[in-house]
Amino acid sequence: MPPYSQKSIARSRGFSRSLATSIFTSGLKVPCSDKTTSANAKRFGKDRKGTQRYRCLSCSKTFTTQERVEGKYLPLDKAVLCLQLLVEGNSLRSVERITGVTLHPLLDLLLLVGEKCERLFDDKIKDVPVRDVQADEMWGYVGMKEKTKKRKMAADALSVDATLGDAYTFVAIERHTKLVLAWHLGRRTVKHTVDFTEKLYEATSGRFQLTTDGFAAYPDAVAYSLGTRVDFAQLIKIYSQPRDGEHRYSPAEVVEAIPSPRWGNPIPERICTSHVERHNLTMRMMIRRLTRLTNAFSKKWENLHAALALHFAYYNFCRIHKSIRCTPSMEAGITKTVWTLKDLLTY
């Protein structure tokens, strides 16, 4: 197709010659709308947000040079700002008020980046040499708590969505590098515990010491997935009876912690779950839907899964840990630089 002249474009658009000359300027070299070739283009006004638009003289398509999220209208810089607010503990509604991006595009962005972060985690966190690993599970819920779900099922005699109710996040962290090695969202059952230990098997290499809490499903799951690769021990905590008025909101006081070696040769001084429990606090603070005693909670299982994937990727690759003064992935030798949220979004 021959290049369009200013006269023909002005005539087709109803512009005067002087107005057409001011709008269309020659000599621009910008990427064409198909993003594969570089072609001559002319300025073609601005969109409703004030972004400069261009028209290709070869294919006559109009486009902007502003980077956008893959398959979305949302500009890339605005998407990065939304993600930055999310990983720092803001709710979806607060991000909506701050950025002006409405709820549904935010949820679409969360699901998109969650999928990318999960793929990044699977690609990078694999066969990592480790020495001391701690594992724990953290409670949350989707839609409603488990007791409410059971009560509604009994009262209404109707089936309730299976994804609603309690949702536990299993986490394994390396004590020295602070690297999150594996995570799994599921129920607190034997099956989901085995799924978690299988992920831990894929993520690690060599022999290491593993410490968990006293959950009864761990010994069989660890034996099935990791076998004699680990020196396994459990830290069993004894809790006191809650006092009057504290049983609902306050956690029970730990009166004793009993180290219990299971097999191998675990070093008694390293039988500890303090680091992974401290990371649980980090999750509570940085993931708004997991904050206790608020009205923030996930309405759908896939939204919680995406939020967790974003958090763990950000924690491993982007967030500088104060105790090691770099990211956990750099300390573990997986990456050499600090990643940005833009890197996660475009992975």
Image (spheres, helix red, strand yellow):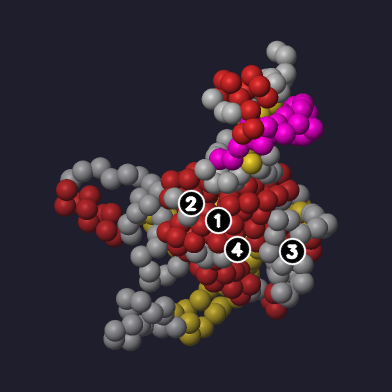
State the CA–CA distance, disc 4 to disc 3: 20 Å
In the picture provided, is 226 more to the left or to the right than 104? right
- Badge nearest the viewer, 1 or 4: 1
- State the residue at coordinates (32%, 44%): 161
* Residue 239 falls left or right of residue 65: left
Question: What residue is shown with label 1?
Answer: 82
**Quarter of the image containing the N terminus?**
top right
Q: How far apart are marks 3 and 1 (CA)?
A: 21 Å
Q: Mark 3 points at which residue?
A: 327
The spot of residue 129 in percent (x, y) is 79, 57
Which residue is found at the position 54% from the left and 59% from the top? 86
- Asked if the residues shown at circle 3 and circle 1 are in contact, with their CB atoms under 8 angstroms apart, the answer is no
Instruction: Give me the C-alpha separation between circle 1 and circle 4.
Output: 31 Å
Specify few, some or many for label 4: CA neighbours under 10 Å numbering under 14, 14-19, or 20 or more. many
Q: Is mark 2 on a helix, strand or loop?
A: loop
Nearer to me, 111 or 332: 111
Between 233 and 305, the one nearer to me in the picture: 305
Asked whether residue 221 is in view, the answer is no
Q: Name the residue under label 4.
A: 135
Q: In which quarter of the image is residue 293?
A: bottom left
Task: Give the residue type at disc 3.
Answer: Thr
Q: In this view, does 11 lie above or below 120?
A: above
